Image (cartoon, coloured by chain):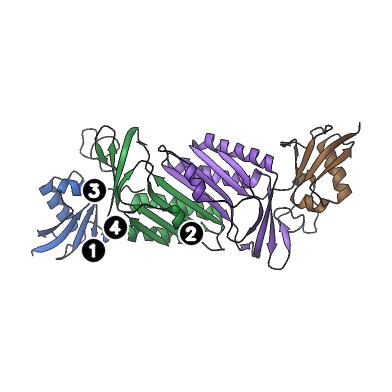
Chain colours: A brown, B blue, C purple, D green
Amino acid sequence: MNKSVSVSYYAILREQRGLGTEEVPTMAVTASDLYEELRARHGFTLPASRVRVAVNDDFQPWGVAVEDGDRIAFLPPVAGG
Amino acid sequence: MNKSVSVSYYAILREQRGLGTEEVPTMAVTASDLYEELRARHGFTLPASRVRVAVNDDFQPWGVAVEDGDRIAFLPPVAGG
Amino acid sequence: MEFRVTGQKIDPAQLILAIGDTRVGACVTFEGRVRRQNEGRSVLSLDYEAFKPLAEKEGQRILEEARQKFGVLDAVCVHRTGSLKLGDLAVWIAITAEHRGAAFDACRYVIDEAKARVPIWKKEHYGDGSTEWINCATRGPGVSGPGPAG
Amino acid sequence: MEFRVTGQKIDPAQLILAIGDTRVGACVTFEGRVRRQNEGRSVLSLDYEAFKPLAEKEGQRILEEARQKFGVLDAVCVHRTGSLKLGDLAVWIAITAEHRGAAFDACRYVIDEAKARVPIWKKEHYGDGSTEWINCATRGPGVSGPGPAG
């Protein structure tokens, strides 16, 4: 089934994508599928093992199902403080 | 030999003596002798094992010789902070 | 207890007034400031970027953990976003407790966990004109990635 | 580096301005405040008394030890004397360092050593009208003295 999700990128991912948020039509089943799809399309340097995913403003495991209308954020390794 | 020293008391010792500093003529050889002499005279509750002595503004061991003109301070267990 | 992400200058003198009552015997604060050198490179300025809703949510969880683990009375953390120059305050934490042990341990816990878990990122601008997103390198020492150095 | 004993109110907001340059990445502060309860007794106020010349000398030695042990950049401690009421600041310590680990460890070291070594005394005034010089009891629990409790 075709879905549309809102995808946000932060830090190095935002720069490599060239924008912060976009609507993405996708057939990805899991967040992991979606990241690999977008990584191939935009040439992200970070492997999924070093990125975390948030869905609707909370952390989720990579295996979480992608639902139509989700707000999905890809988070590079953090470095606050 | 008779000597005269300046003796200062702090905290509970000051209260038990009823004053902060006094001139004391003494024949005491060591600071320890002097404390025992004054303890007997003024009824200090603290044994020497729980008091420290300073001579001329620095800590000294109890065996330090008492010299004429020394400034001697008796220091109860500290409790700063 | 509040974990706040802000684009405004942090003013500890103002913030600390809001903290504490007469149960408090100890207050430990931590300031993280922008310093002029990092791992041997000369730093000119920093940009901080945050995923604000999740940063504040995860930060709040950390403060709550600190309260439960160490029995502290209050815990506040404010983290900057935006462009910071040398000497600027990037993060400020204050912990109050009856006794100092809990306040020290909780303050250390909050900054360590915040650095590891809160979605905030830091880009350093160096004296040689280059920039780097900290922790995001995919080559070089310490990174297990596809680079030739392994 | 300065260890100061003062009869005046301590003003951290003012003091912290004097500390630090752009080498500093971390500043940890400790505030010791007068709290309303100590070991189950209701406290109304405190008197602090110091043997000032030796307190400042011994305090300075502690700051120097902290600098050498932990490699911190600066260390300041101010301790009150006189009559303090609930909520008043009794002692303030600030440590700056490049990294947070050194700043936390040094700050903890300074307060622990100051409490154990600096000739400053504290008299508590209780709700029931009684008073006590802390650590100076010669009878009762925890004291090895001539008292009947041993």
How many marks the image carries: the answer is 4
Quadrant hosting residue C99:
top left
What is the spatial separation of the Cα atoms under label 4 and label 2, in whole angstroms? 25 Å
State left or right for residue D19 relative to residue D5: right
Q: Which mark is residue D52?
A: 4
Q: Earlier in the sequence, mark 4 or mark 2?
A: 2
- Image x and y of residue D105, in percent: 49, 52
Mark 1 packing: few (<14 Cα in 10 Å), some, or many (20+)? some
The amino acid at mark 4 is: Lys
Residue C132 relative to residue C12: left or right: right
**Looking at this rendering, what residue extends furthest in the left direction?**
B2
> Where's residue D31, x and y in %?
43, 48
2 vs 3, front mark: 2
Looking at the rendering, in which quadrant would you find the C terminus of chain D? top left
| Disc 4, SS | helix
The quarter in which the N terminus of chain D is drawn is bottom left
Quadrant of the rendered structure where residue C51 is? top right
In the image, are marks 2 and 1 on the same chain? no
Q: Residue at x 31, y 54 (%)?
A: D7
Q: Chain of mark 1?
A: B
Percent coordinates x, y for residue D102 in the rendering: 52, 55
Residues under numbered marks 2 and 1 in contact, where contact means CB atoms less than 8 Å apart:
no
Type of amino acid under label 1: Asn
Marks 4 and 3, how far apart at CA: 13 Å
> Crowding at label 2, few (<14), some or many (≥20) Cα neighbours within 10 Å?
few
Q: Are marks 3 and 1 in contact (CB under 8 Å)?
A: no
Q: Are marks 2 and 3 in contact (CB under 8 Å)?
A: no
Q: Chain of mark 3?
A: B
Q: Which residue is mark 2?
A: D17
